[in-house]
Image: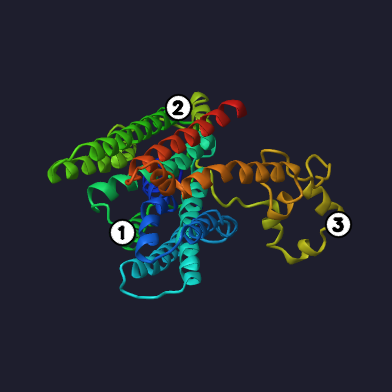
């Protein structure tokens, strides 16, 4: 019977990471609420209290990540993306039908539920790309988490560029783009975001690749802020607007330079076992995925299987005749759901996240009203600046956490 050999390539994880960057940029739809909240107030006749309640609905859906997190251990990435795509299409579709006056007199509670469903798609998109790539890059979890979480923050600035340059400051066009454009983008990325077996040897080029991704993301963030401010201060011609959006798209395609480089200029990185075998003058051995054990050989004879004593089973389960004792996972190891809820660390992080996010969420949901109070009719610049500093905070947190962990 032929042996099954693990596939230990490096290009598939990087292609999946490039696709995940697009999904992360799309997953920041909750940050677009200030761009169309004023239209909800004027077109649908809502008061400020109702608009605030809808903002709470958006944050409620965007931060309901328990279900996607639990499903990530049971569902394939494409299935999780499909759930997020369906939520995005249905939720924002209802809001677009109401705001564009295609369907009249939808009840307020239905719009509340629709916004919860719409923004909950962000949790499915974010969880899928983050969990899959953290498993594909186990040695670079800190920079990877910081990068992907930071892209969620800067996605608001990307939406403001699209809103001001391509969608002509139309809230109805923005909701239509969220209803159709985001699902199409995630469908195109679905094939590439999948689990890949990471290389067995440590790749010395991996920190360089992540430094490249971090550098391009910082340049993208600065470019989005400058572009938004310039477009709001000066009246730019249509051709120049399209060129500026095309440059933003090129920035988003820059992560593909890594797998292209690895294809054209492959590095001779080998696993530690292969290098050791080469030094000893032996040929590298492929490690089979399924290794036959002594218990498998015993199964070939039914008489021998019946004669195995309890002591032999106990010795087989231990190491050097000492039985392994079950222990709870330690800090830094993987926990099950039931084990997490009894840890003080979890509740400390939960309360810190709850209290720390509250202030930022309050400001984000009321950016439009804050701008109007200061006489600013167009809040796209405020949303862009808020997204930029959200991006820098997330990126710095990933880099600092990696520094202190190591």
Identify the residue at horizontal 40%, vertical 36% (top origin). Answer: 388
Query: Is tag 2's residue or tag 3's residue first in the polypeptide sequence?
Result: 2
Q: Viewer-nearest of labels 1 and 2?
A: 1
Q: Identify which residue, 4 or 14, lies in the foreground.
A: 14
Which residue bears the numbered disc 1? 177
Residue 305 placement (x, y as % from top left): 77, 62
Please tell me whether mark 1 sits on a helix, a strand or a loop. Answer: helix
Whether 397 is drawn above or below 122: the answer is: above
Residue 265 in view, yes or no: yes
Which residue bears the numbered disc 3? 310
Residue 79 in view, yes or no: no
Which residue bears the numbered disc 2? 204
How many badges with numbers are in the image?
Answer: 3
Cβ atoms at labels 3 and 1 below 8 Å apart: no
Whether 252 is drawn above or below 207: the answer is: below
Identify the residue at horizontal 56%, vertical 42% (top origin). Answer: 359
């Amino acid at each position: 019977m032929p042996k099954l050999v693990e596939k230990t390539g490096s290009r598939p994880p990087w292609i999946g990471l490039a696709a995940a960057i697009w999904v992360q940029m799309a997953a920041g739809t909750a940050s677009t609420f200030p761009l169309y909240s004023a239209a909800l107030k004027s077109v649908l006749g809502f008061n400020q209290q109702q608009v605030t309640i809808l903002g709470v609905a958006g944050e409620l859906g965007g931060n309901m990540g328990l279900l996607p997190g639990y499903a990530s251990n049971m569902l394939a990435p494409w299935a999780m993306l499909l759930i997020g795509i369906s939520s995005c299409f249905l939720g924002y579709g209802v809001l677009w039908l109401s705001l564009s006056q295609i369907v009249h007199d939808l009840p307020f509670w239905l719009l509340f539920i629709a916004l919860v469903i719409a923004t909950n798609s962000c949790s499915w998109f974010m969880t899928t790309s983050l969990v899959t790539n953290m498993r594909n890059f186990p040695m670079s979890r800190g920079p990877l988490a910081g990068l992907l979480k930071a892209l969620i923050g800067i996605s608001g600035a990307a939406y403001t560029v699209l809103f001001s340059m391509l969608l002509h400051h139309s809230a109805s066009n923005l909701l239509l783009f969220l209803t159709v454009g985001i699902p199409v983008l995630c469908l195109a990325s679905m094939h590439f975001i999948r689990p890949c077996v990471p290389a067995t040897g440590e790749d010395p080029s991996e920190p360089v690749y992540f430094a490249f991704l971090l550098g391009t993301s910082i340049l993208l963030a600065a470019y989005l802020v400058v572009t938004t401010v310039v477009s709001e201060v000066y009246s730019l011609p249509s051709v120049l607007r399209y060129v500026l959006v095309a440059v933003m798209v090129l920035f988003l395609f820059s992560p593909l330079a890594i797998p292209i480089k690895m294809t054209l200029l492959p590095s001779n990185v080998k696993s530690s076992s292969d290098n050791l075998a080469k030094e000893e003058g032996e040929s590298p051995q492929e490690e089979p995925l399924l290794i036959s054990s002594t218990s498998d050989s015993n199964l070939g004879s039914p008489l021998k299987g019946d004669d195995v004593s309890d002591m032999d089973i106990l010795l087989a389960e231990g190491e050097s005749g000492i039985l392994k004792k079950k222990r709870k996972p330690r800090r830094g190891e993987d926990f099950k759901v039931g084990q997490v809820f009894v840890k003080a660390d979890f509740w400390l992080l939960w309360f810190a996240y709850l209290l720390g996010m509250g202030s930022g969420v309050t400001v984000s949901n009321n950016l439009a009203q804050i701008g109007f109070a200061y006489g600013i009719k167009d809040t796209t610049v405020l949303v862009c600046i808020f997204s930029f500093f959200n991006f820098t905070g997330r990126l710095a947190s990933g880099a600092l956490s990696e520094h202190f962990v190591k």
